[in-house]
Image (spheres, rainbow, N blue to C red):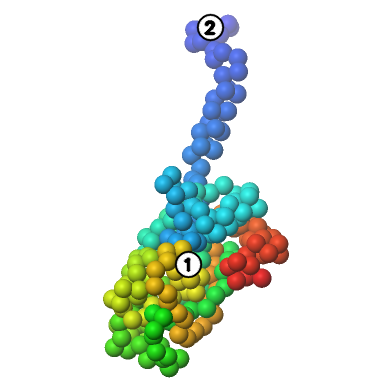
Amino acid sequence: MRIPRSNARRPPPGWVAAALTAWAVASVQAAPTLRVLVYPVPGLFDVHDDGRIGGTGGALLTKISHASEVPFEAESLPIARAWSMLLGQPQVCVLGMARTPEREARFQWVSVVSRADLIVYGRADAAPLPHDLAALRGKAVVSLRETATASELRDHGVAVQEVSSALSALRMLQAGRVDYWYSHQIVAESTANAAGGPAIKPLFTTARIDGYMACNLEVPATVIDKLRQALQRLRRNGDLADFGVR
């Protein structure tokens, strides 16, 4: 018995290969891009008009990308927004996060990127203070929102004014709207050096703190490993020395 030949047209030669190629290209294009977030700090992470991030921190981002061979988009956001994105979006990392017990299980900790002191700053004419945060009770104190310094002040009973940018904190101190600024050393001194204005001075140090590159739990392990190896290599080469890591 003969089987009638189908009248359906056969796909032209190479059709299957072309379809698979198109599918593969679409899959690559659809792959989520890693985003690396930093905080706006004048002199450290300067944002240009075209969105590029400059300063010494911007140069470090470029080195991390080249050394890891991991493409990513860098963006500068206020700490509260960066924190929200790190928690809620799967392909996000933040540069310079303090590693605390309550945060330990919530993120992947790639490697240390900075090491500096937490310092209480005053204006140039500020009188000496006891080396205790409790001495700031009843004083006008500013700190960055969603930071370890702000939390520590609250824990010591200090009614801290929280702001979203280091430049705002600096200007408040310089203008006499607050008397003290409790800050990460690199953040405060980079901002003061870049922004200028009346001098500020360190009054006392409370602790030394490490800043890490931290990533959402859904960032692939292969990406985390490449970033970790890159940062370790940059550390050996001295590229993290300006950030206190040797």
Residue 169 visible in the snapshot: no
Q: Position of residue 22 (x, y in %)?
A: 54, 28
Say above or below: 68 vs 108.
above
Q: Position of residue 213 (x, y in %)?
A: 54, 63
- Residue 242, by quadrant, is bottom right
Q: Position of residue 241 (x, y in %)?
A: 63, 67
In which quadrant of the rendered image does the C terminus lie? bottom right
Residue placed most toward the observer, 30 or 188: 188
Residue that badge 1 annotates: 193
Residue placed most toward the observer, 176 or 44: 176
In which quadrant of the rendered image does the N terminus lie? top right
What amino acid type should be assigned to the residue bearing mark 2?
A: Pro
* Total labels drawn: 2
In front: label 1 or label 2 = 1
Q: Position of residue 88 (x, y in %)?
A: 40, 58
Give the residue displayed 34% in from the left and 69% down from the top.
171
Residue 139 visible in the snapshot: yes
* Residue 4: numbered disc: 2
Give the residue displayed 47% in from the left and 74% down from the top.
184
Give the residue displayed 60% in from the left and 55% down from the top.
64
Residue placed most toward the observer, 205 or 145: 205
* Comes first in the chain, label 1 or label 2: 2
101 relative to 230 in the view: left or right = left
What amino acid type should be assigned to the residue bearing mark 1?
A: Asn
Furthest toward the bottom, the residue is 130
Give the residue displayed 48% in from the left and 71% down from the top.
189
**Badge 1 local density, few (<14 within 10 Å), some, or many (20+)?**
few
SS class, disc 1: helix
**Badge 2 local density, few (<14 within 10 Å), some, or many (20+)?**
few
166 relative to 230 in the view: left or right = left
Residue placed most toward the observer, 211 or 108: 211
